[in-house]
Amino acid sequence: MTASVYRKSGGARWLVAVALTFMVLFLVLPLATVFAEALARGFEAYGATLTHPDAIAAIKLTLTVAAISVPLNVVFGIAAAWAIAKFDFPGKSLLVTFIDLPFSVSPVVAGLVYVLLFGMQGWLGPWLREHDIQIIFAVPGIVLATIFVTFPFVARELIPLMAEQGRDDEEAALSLGASGFQTFLRVTLPNIRWGLFYGVLLCNARAMGEFGAVSVVSGHLRGLTNTMPLHVEILYNEYNFVAAFAVASLLALLALLTLVLKSILEWRFGYHHGSAGH
Amino acid sequence: MISLDGISKRFGTFDALRNIDLEVRDDEFLALLGPSGSGKTTLLRIIAGLAFPDAGRVSFNGEDVTDLKVADRKVGFVFQHYALFRHMSVADNVGFGLSVRPRRQRPRKPEIRARARDLLELVQLGGLEDRYPAQLSGGQRQRVALARALAVEPQLLLLDEPFGALDAKVRKELRRWLRQLHEQMKLTSIFVTHDQEEALELADRVVVMNDGAIEQIGPPEDIYMAPRSSFVSGFVGDTNSLPVTVADGVPRFHDRPIAVDAAGVAEGSARLDFRPHDIALDGDQAGSLPMIVTGAYRTGGNWRVEGTVSGLSRVIEIDLATDRPPPEPGQRLALRITRGRLFPDEKARP
């Protein structure tokens, strides 16, 4: 009934037109430009820039960072969501607030906090130097910054889901003699798998695409501490547009792949995500 | 035998259970009956080991199990909303308890499946092994939940509002069936309900709970015919309640003497409870109660007649035989209370 009401109204048609125009202007056109620029000098040049050692190093580093930070955030996310959704304890609302912190704080600030903590002049700087551990301007710093920025994705996806499912299934499993671990593996995990997959998808997309926080702690050492987004920036600043857009096109492909998987998830399994819509 | 000694439980400042003593006999079908918030579910969860008391002792056959976790108590628990594992087939749900046993005690897969099939036959769901919970009706899900709880061969079966989420017809069928199943299996069972009809029909004994304490324990007949408090008589079955004053062995409602024996009742204000069917119409006699009819409707083989009594804000309900037409609204009836019970006054009931 509402649909037919809207169809007849001229105002609604206007709104749709405006939305579509904006979408084309600000989303489709830039995405097309990325691929157009990347392929401006043909497939050969495109391939050559992507197989350049620096580019390969950047891709490898990005994959490594994602491969470390996403699993860690899956563990943290499940643990936090479990605690928040299934138990009452003092300080619960504080924990929920902290989980949202990475969303509310600028990624650059997050990066600076790590520099302040682990940098040469930072609080832990002297101790780290003594023990010959380098975090800032090295891979560990990039991983830490990425974990911080992507922390909320899994937890925020799971909290409403787990809260809605309640504790009955777990209690049923326990009453049937299952251990805590068996209950988690055979009851809790299957109940949250689609939500978890969704959270991982978003978490991964952000982990690979993160720029601000990583930029601060990376030091931009070519072939060493440059992730793909940072590499794109460097190439662009050097007026190497084809190379810059070629690497950018990979990130764009990742985004498209994420969208496709997300849509499949929503259509095929009727999964509607909760509140982590950032 | 299951014994509870001095069980108390608080949630924050709320006393959920206050010093509960209870003994459950072997093979007995026991109902915990009470309004919501009376503590009955909390008590059931404490017996199961899903919750733990702040004070008191739970023992099974003389063995103290107060600190034992649910997994170690050998109880079957059936949840109000079934709590079936939605990603497992019916057979896998039923076999779950066997499949999580330590490797040495775990039956082999075909054995688990055979056992699941037997249990599904027992709960009259043979042939549905490969369905998923979402493909079953509410009554079927409840039976799967029951089969799943029985699969681990519990020494005690606990059911939390087992029929609460079902429609009236299915509920009645399932109730009768569960009663038969209990007689067949002879398994000590405790179920929680807020539905007095359910408790009276199913249970060997009924425990009436109110406000975290036990009001009365007894066979259904006693609970209905000899309620020990005004709360019990009001909660179990329909009851009319009159505020009266007892003086010289005679209860009076607004100075009108009522012909009910008040022997052994303390002088002063009291409450006179009587069932809708515990009245007779004897014309105007001394000791009768005048009622003005406001309406009547049929309940099975009776007319349920509603009316007002001057000086009482609550409606009075009485049952009359259907061998004559129901009284007209406005008609005046004189009620003689044939069976009434006097209770010390409670402030809670207006």
Image: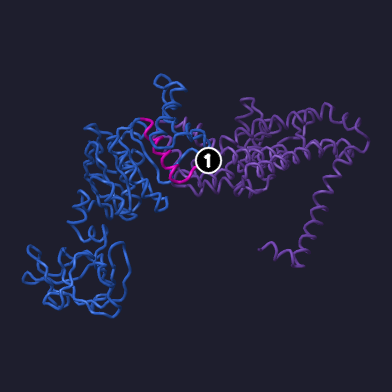
Chain colours: A purple, B blue
The residue drawn where x is 67% and y is 48% is: A106
Q: Main secondary structure of the magenta part?
A: helix
The residue drawn where x is 30% and y is 78% is: B329
Q: Is residue A105 visible?
A: yes
Image quarter of the N terminus of chain A: bottom right
Q: Is residue A145 visible?
A: no
The boundaries of the magenta stretch are: B133-152
The part of the image, by quadrant, that contains residue B326 is bottom left
Is A166 or B248 nearer to us in this picture? Answer: B248
Disc 1: which residue = A80
Vertical placement of residue B323 versus B292, above or below: above
- The secondary structure type at the circle numbered 1 is helix
Residue A272: x percent and y percent? 62, 47
Q: Of all residues shown, which one is farthest toward the right?
A: A41
Q: Of all residues shown, which one is farthest toward the left?
A: B248
Residue B6 lies within the magenta run: no
Is B183 or A168 nearer to us in this picture? Answer: B183
Query: In the drawing, does residue B271 fall left or right of residue A261?
Result: left
The part of the image, by quadrant, that contains residue A139 is top right
Query: In the drawing, does residue B104 fall left or right of residue B63?
Result: right
Vertical placement of residue A154 versus B308, above or below: above
The residue drawn where x is 16% and y is 77% is: B283
Residue B252: x percent and y percent? 13, 74
Picture mark count: 1
Query: In the drawing, does residue A215 fall left or right of residue B66?
Result: right
Kindly identify which chain the residue marked by label 1 belongs to: A
Count residues near mark 1 (Cα–Cα under 10 Å), then give few for <14, some for 14-19, many for 20+.
many
